[in-house]
Image: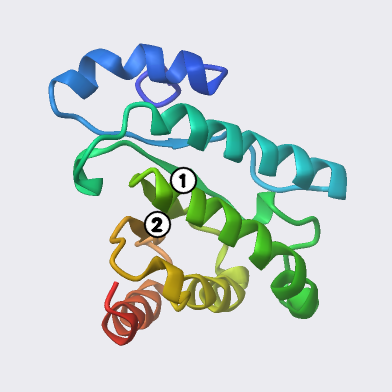
Amino acid sequence: GNQFVLGQTIEQAIKRGRAELREGFLYSYDMLGEAARTDEDAKRYFDSYSNAIDSIAKACKGDVRKNPGISVKLSALLARYEYGNKERVMNELLPRAKELVKKAAAANMGFNIDAEEQDRLDLSLDVIEALVADPELAGWYGFGVVVQAYGTRSAFALDCLYGLAEKYDR
């Protein structure tokens, strides 16, 4: 597990990964934990992601493809992240996600939406499209999406993401 879990805090992870960064390796740092269960959990996850972006940004210079990044689970940003709550997702989660994405873009670092379960794929793609379509992100090519390649809907997801990348020139 130490190969993939570099530390209990973002500072520990960055410190432990420095040698590999100097050798040309990159990390997309991820927070362990799957989902917010309460609004307080979502606030803590949002703050943790925001602080992690600040910490990671210190190592970012030049080309976004040569900078470390962060992976974010949408389910961490809102309790009850499910299709039945789509309106709440778009009204509450989307602004939180946009704030984090724009912060990462300002640091010229990678920002990846981490994979979620198949039953959340349609909702995740709606959120992803809203983020990718934001005109303030034009010219920044650090947005990524983690796809569960073994999933039965992965080919659909990849086709959809490819279409979004073409449509919005991302």
Q: Assign a secondary structure to mark 1.
A: strand
Q: Quadrant of residue 70?
A: top left
Q: Quadrant of residue 24?
A: top left
Q: Examine the rendering and report whether any part of residue 124 can be seen.
A: yes
Quadrant where the C terminus is found in the figure: bottom left
**How many numbered markers are drawn?**
2
Between residue 6 and residue 155, name the one nearer to us.
Answer: 6
Residue 107: percent from the left, percent from the top? 39, 43
Where 91 sits versus 75, above or below? Answer: below
Residue 38: percent from the left, percent from the top? 86, 48
Disc 1 and disc 2 in contact, CB within 8 angstroms: yes
Q: Residue at x 56, y 35 (%)?
A: 31
The residue labelled by disc 1 is: 71
- Earlier-in-chain disc, 1 versus 2: 1
Q: Residue at x 37, y 12 (%)?
A: 16
Mark 2 belongs to which amino acid?
Answer: Val
Q: Examine the rendering and report whether any part of residue 152 can be seen.
A: no
Colour mapping used in the image: rainbow
Residue 112: percent from the left, percent from the top? 42, 53
Q: Quadrant of residue 61?
A: top left
The residue labelled by disc 2 is: 146
Mark 1 belongs to which amino acid?
Answer: Ser
Where 68 sits versus 15, above or below? Answer: below
